[in-house]
Image (spheres, coloured by chain):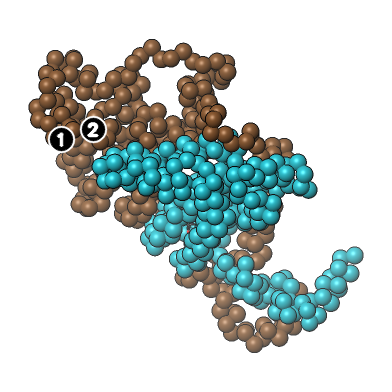
């Protein structure tokens, strides 16, 4: 069949350009022995992949058609009201954070953090192949964040029932869980009573009465970021030097903020803390 | 038998109609295989040759291509669904009921649309994970990663806006949850930090802009419909075009 080339008039007129194209790749410098023609090698692979995927979608559509519930009504609120699964991570965060954090600030940080990844990772190794050992830090941080995201979605999908309470698969999902015995309290109240601090404000800024305990919670939050920024700077000089000043501060800001999310979850679950910091305008 | 088929094919390949469309013979020679790649607009997304390593399924897991396929499936089934759907709170739900019960293949088109949407959200996350794990965002592909994150966002927003359209309980309350979050946007949300201080109330804040009102009602349905069926698909298609263009320009990161 290979004599066919000369049959076609178009091929002869374009032959010089064509023979160059047959040998060249998009990547340019690669030796032709290491490359193959896209038709049929890649095109057929894509065709097969496409047919398998379309079959799976058709199969799923036939066995599990799209759901349609009752007509929308503002009068009856379903319990629980669940967002689509890919947003249940955010909805699950609502248990631990106020909506401005769970629904707006944290997702924004997540997306900005994702966008910045290529500019924050100066490691030239591990480009174009799977490797863990050559880029441990970036792999661990990314996997941690992604794992946290999927874990939250998983909990939202499989463990949240009536009133957004926790249900095990073997619980009766039609019965309300008894209201939790523990009452949630703010960190500053815990500090106030356990350290015996005065309730009268040190200073009053408009609506904001700053008590000693409240000031302490600011210090704790500041220390969380402060320690996070300084420890690697002091003890992992190599890490700092590789990143440089700007990158280092951005990486640490996103890293510490990300770690703050599971920290708050733990503080809530272990010590029933509602907010770690309270101001008249926002609560964390 | 085979030779008969071959004869028919050769005869077809010689006709004026075939030549006017394809401009080259059947791609069974290196020359025609190269020509087919740059004379066909869809195949032209590819280069003529790729490195062997790029073919390894275990490198890409076909995930970017699958995401694109689901987008195409969604566009096709979406156009069909649009024939039967009117974004009016008084009839939207009944239109979906008709699709499920009266219209030939209506239920199937709706199911394919919905499953493709789930699949696209899933595969876009997986694709991003793959790109990260192979370090394919490293220079010179930093900007294509940024384009990718934009595609991730438009994919999620597309799914979410589509969720409202059936106007059933699932739709209304899922979107209500989302609009509560918009209300809490710092500085520009009525219930967000510093929102009220800056003069934002329920009648002019972020949630109001999203819903076109203070509740999830007719204006919200119309907004979501226009975003879902027109604005977002166009934006997504545009960014996909940029994404693919950049892959061609930067070359593919796969192994040798
Ligand atoms: C609608 C969404 C998207 C579509 C249709 C899409 C499509 C594709 C396709 C077909 C490829 C070729 C290789 C492959 O199949 O894996 C690719 C590569 C790539 N994608 Fe995407 N993608 C999307 C979203 C994303 C996202 C969310 C990211 C990252 C945040 C991303 C980053 C990249 C990068 C950096 C490459 C180059 C990979 C390499 O050279 O190895 N894309 N994309």
User: For the residues carrying marks 2 and 1, which lies nearer the camera in this image?
Assistant: 1
Q: Is residue B147 shown left or right of residue B89?
A: left
Q: Which residue is mark 1?
A: A206
Q: Which residue is mark 2?
A: A280
Where is residue A45? Give x, y as percent. Answer: 65, 57
Which residue appears at 59% of the width and 70% of the height?
B44
Q: Quadrant of residue A252?
A: top left
Where is residue B213? Give x, y as percent. Answer: 45, 45
Where is residue B59? Give x, y as percent. Answer: 53, 51
Where is residue B110? Give x, y as percent. Answer: 68, 46
The residue sitting at the left extreme is: A202
Any atom of ligand 1 within 8 Å of the CB at mark 2?
A: no
Q: Nearer the viewer, residue A187 or B48?
A: A187
Q: Is residue B39 shown left or right of residue A278?
A: right
Q: Quadrant of residue A198?
A: top left
The C terminus of chain A sits in image quarter: top left
* CB-based contact (under 8 Å), mark 2 and mark 1: yes
Q: Is residue A193 shown left or right of residue A79?
A: left
Regarding residue B74, the answer to whether it shows in the image is yes
Secondary element under disc 2, as helix, strand or loop, is: loop
Chain coloured brown in this rendering: A
Which residue appears at 17% of the width and 27% of the height?
A214
Which residue appears at 26% of the width and 48% of the height?
A250
Q: Nearer the viewer, residue B116 or B231?
A: B231
Q: Nearer the viewer, residue B131 or A275?
A: A275
Which residue appears at 40% of the width and 32% of the height?
A94
Q: Read off the chain for label 2.
A: A
Colour chain B is painted in: cyan
């Amino acid at each position: 069949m290979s004599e066919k080339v000369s049959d076609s008039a178009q091929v002869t007129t374009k032959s010089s350009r064509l023979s160059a194209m047959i040998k060249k790749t998009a990547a340019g410098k690669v030796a032709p022995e290491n490359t193959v023609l896209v038709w049929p090698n890649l095109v057929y692979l894509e065709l097969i992949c496409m047919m398998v995927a379309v079959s799976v979608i058709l199969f799923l559509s036939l066995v599990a058609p799209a759901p349609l519930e009752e007509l929308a009504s503002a009068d009856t609120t379903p319990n629980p009201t669940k967002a689509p699964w890919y947003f249940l991570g955010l909805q699950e965060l609502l248990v631990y954070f106020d909506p401005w954090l769970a629904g707006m600030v944290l997702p924004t940080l997540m997306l900005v953090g994702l966008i910045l990844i290529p500019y924050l990772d100066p490691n030239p190794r591990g480009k174009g192949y799977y490797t863990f050992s050559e880029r441990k830090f970036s792999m661990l941080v990314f996997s941690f964040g992604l794992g946290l995201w999927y874990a939250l979605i998983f909990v939202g999908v499989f463990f949240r029932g009536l009133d957004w309470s926790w249900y095990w698969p073997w619980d009766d999902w039609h019965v309300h869980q008894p209201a939790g015995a523990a009452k949630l309290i703010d960190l500053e109240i815990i500090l106030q009573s356990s350290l015996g601090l005065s309730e009268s404000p040190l200073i009053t800024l408009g609506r904001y009465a700053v008590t000693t305990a409240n000031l302490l919670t600011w210090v704790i939050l500041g220390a969380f970021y402060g320690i996070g920024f300084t420890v690697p700077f002091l003890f992992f000089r190599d890490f700092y030097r590789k990143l440089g000043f700007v990158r280092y501060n951005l990486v640490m800001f996103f890293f510490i903020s990300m770690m703050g999310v599971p920290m708050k979850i733990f503080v809530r679950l272990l010590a029933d803390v509602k907010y770690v910091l309270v101001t008249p305008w926002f609560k964390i | 038998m085979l030779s008969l088929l071959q004869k028919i094919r050769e005869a077809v390949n010689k006709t004026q109609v075939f030549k006017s469309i394809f401009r080259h013979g059947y791609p069974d020679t290196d020359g025609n295989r190269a020509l087919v790649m740059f004379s066909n607009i869809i195949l032209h997304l590819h280069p003529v040759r790729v490195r062997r390593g790029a073919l390894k399924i275990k490198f890409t897991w076909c995930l970017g291509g699958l995401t694109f396929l689901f987008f195409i499936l969604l566009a096709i089934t979406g156009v069909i669904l649009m024939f039967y759907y009117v974004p009016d709170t008084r009839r939207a739900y009944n239109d979906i009921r008709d699709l499920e019960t009266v219209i030939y293949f209506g239920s199937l088109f709706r199911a394919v649309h919905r499953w493709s949407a789930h699949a696209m959200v899933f595969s876009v996350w997986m694709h991003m994970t793959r790109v990260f794990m192979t370090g394919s965002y490293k220079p010179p592909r930093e900007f294509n990663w940024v384009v990718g994150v934009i595609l991730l966002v438009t994919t999620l927003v597309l799914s979410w806006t589509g969720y409202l359209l059936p106007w059933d309980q699932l739709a209304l309350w899922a979107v209500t949850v989302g609009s509560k979050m918009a209300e809490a946007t710092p500085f520009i949300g009525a219930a967000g930090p510093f929102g009220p201080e800056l003069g934002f109330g329920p009648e002019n804040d972020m949630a109001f802009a999203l819903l076109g009102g203070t509740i999830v009602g007719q204006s919200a349905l119309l907004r979501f419909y226009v975003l879902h069926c027109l604005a977002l698909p166009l934006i997504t298609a545009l960014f996909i075009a940029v994404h693919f263009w950049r892959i061609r320009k930067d070359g593919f990161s796969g192994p040798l």
